[in-house]
Image: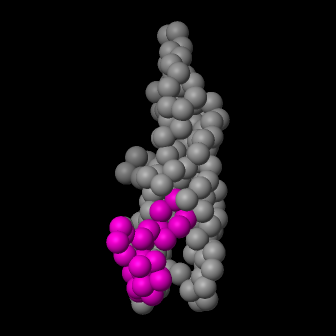
Amino acid sequence: WSGTSSLTVRNTHGVVMRFAADVTFKLLVPPGEDPEEVEKLPLQMFVPESGTASAQVDWIEESGCTQSSSFVSGPVDELSGHLYIDFDRRIAMGVGITTIEGTVHRTQCPGSDPTVVPGPIASSWLSLGATGQPLGDDGRTLRGTFVESSTTPGVTTTYEWDFSAERE
């Protein structure tokens, strides 16, 4: 499976936290198992084989404090996420999060000096929800969008994904 995914958080000030990835997944074959037999199973797990994740934050709190993190991108590794695909039920579940080095975090509140700290940022680039998302009618695509409202008034999170199977 390969494709793109993103997670965008917006608040009433119209500012965002955006995390995204372009990733290729591979079938996870447990040690000692025959890959051809694992490919026949109705429930399969896929892990990232390669890809790039990115993150950028430009956020304003109700208090007027601003938080920002410079745009940064980095490699997605095998431990960065997974897709579980149930071909019998035609449902996919999955998550993806990659820690990216090299960003600068800046926080400033009205009447105070800014705080600037270098450090990593976590890019939460994939979430298919607790109940999963349906495969396309062809069984080879996973495309969709859903919007979730936060318990914090005015905050919404938009999840988007577009993946296609690499082979039959």
User: Measuring 63% from the left and 36% from the top, which residue is drawn there?
Assistant: 72
Question: Where 119 falls versus 42 (above or below)?
Answer: above
Quarter of image, res 60: top right
Furthest-front residue in this view: 32
Quadrant location of the N terminus in the rendered image: bottom right
In the drawing, does residue 9 fall left or right of residue 37?
A: right
Between 57 and 140, the residue placed more toward the observer is 140
The answer to whether residue 49 shows anywhere in this view is yes
The answer to whether residue 5 shows anywhere in this view is no
Q: Position of residue 14 (x, y in %)?
A: 61, 43
User: Measuring 53% from the left and 81% from the top, which residue is drawn there?
Assistant: 135
Q: Position of residue 138 (x, y in %)?
A: 61, 89
Quarter of image, res 163: bottom right
In the drawing, does residue 153 fall left or right of residue 105?
A: left
User: Measuring 55% from the left and 59% from the top, which residue is drawn there?
Assistant: 49
- Residue range in magenta is 25-48
